């Protein structure tokens, strides 16, 4: 494991803590309230995954690779979340997290550089984009890139999110509807185009990337709203 990948994995682990604590309020809550959570399965070799909060199963149907669940209502509190394989019925990943009332969260089921399944979560910021625009954040979460960064650019190869490393902080970017977006592994130039029709005005999106062959980038779009 090289030092860059160690740093990237460490950052991803820290991002989960940061993302889930981002919504923290200074006032103490006597009633924890309700949060919403969804699961994204990013591991190509995995079976469908169920998600639990403590001993409560959150979805009736397992989430298969490349797909994501609808939002489930959960208790907004400190608790343990874990996934279970639909075939083996074994626990596959586990994390503890603090969720806060009236916030939405996106949890990713992914593999670390040590080939271990993990859960990482991010808080969704429900900010309405400006007129004629959408908001999007990008996540490089695949070990199949072997530590290589990605360049997300527009039609003129101007940077939208250049040098996107494994586990890099998925920061929201506001773009005009119709902006061409393409992505490639840094210095390889084999660009994958994301159709402009994928994004509509007033919406927020999460786009995560992986690859089947280590060369061509595959994209997956999660609508946050």
Image (cartoon, rainbow, N blue to C red):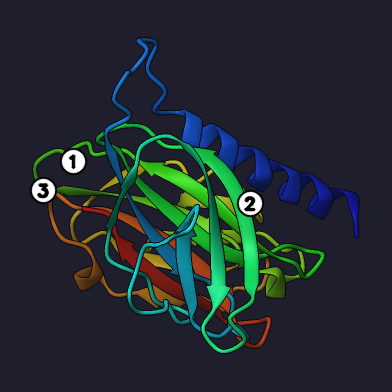
Which one is in front, 171 or 42?
42
Residue at the (24%, 35%) spot, across then down: 102
Q: CA distance from mark 2 to mark 1?
A: 25 Å
Q: Is residue 101 above or below residue 191?
A: above
Q: Quadrant of residue 198?
A: bottom left
Q: CA distance from mark 1 to mark 3?
A: 8 Å
Residue 101, given in percent of the width and then of the height, sits at 29, 32
Q: Secondary structure at mark 2?
A: loop
Left or right for 154, reference 81:
left
Mark before the other along the chain sequence, 2 or 1: 1
Residue at the (22%, 63%) spot, across then down: 199
Q: Is residue 165 above or below residue 199?
A: above
- Which disc, if any, is residue 21? none
Residue 200, given in percent of the width and then of the height, sits at 15, 60
Q: Which residue is mark 3?
A: 132
Residue at the (65%, 38%) spot, across then down: 14
Q: Could you tell me if residue 181 is visible in this image?
A: yes
Q: Which residue is mark 1?
A: 129
């Amino acid at each position: 494991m090289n030092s860059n990948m160690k740093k990237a994995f460490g950052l991803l682990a820290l991002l989960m803590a940061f993302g889930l604590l981002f919504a923290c309020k200074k006032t103490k809550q006597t009633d924890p309230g309700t949060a919403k959570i969804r699961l994204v399965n990013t591991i190509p070799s995995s079976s469908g995954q169920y998600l639990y909060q403590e001993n409560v199963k959150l979805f009736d149907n397992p989430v298969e690779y490349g797909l994501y669940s609808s939002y489930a209502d959960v208790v907004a509190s400190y608790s343990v979340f874990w996934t279970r394989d639909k075939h083996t019925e074994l626990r596959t990943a586990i994390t503890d997290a603090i969720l806060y009332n009236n916030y939405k969260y996106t949890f990713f089921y992914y593999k670390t550089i040590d080939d271990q399944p993990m859960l990482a979560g991010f808080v969704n910021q429900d900010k309405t984009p400006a007129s004629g625009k959408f908001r999007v954040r990008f996540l490089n979460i695949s070990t199949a890139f072997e530590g290589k960064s990605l360049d997300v650019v527009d039609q003129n190869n101007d940077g939208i999110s250049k040098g996107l490393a494994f586990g890099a902080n998925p920061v929201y970017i506001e773009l005009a509807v119709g902006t061409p977006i393409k992505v490639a592994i840094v210095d390889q130039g084999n660009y994958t185009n994301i159709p402009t029709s994928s994004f509509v005005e007033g919406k927020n999106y999460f786009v995560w990337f992986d690859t089947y062959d280590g060369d061509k980038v595959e994209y997956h779009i999660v609508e946050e709203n």
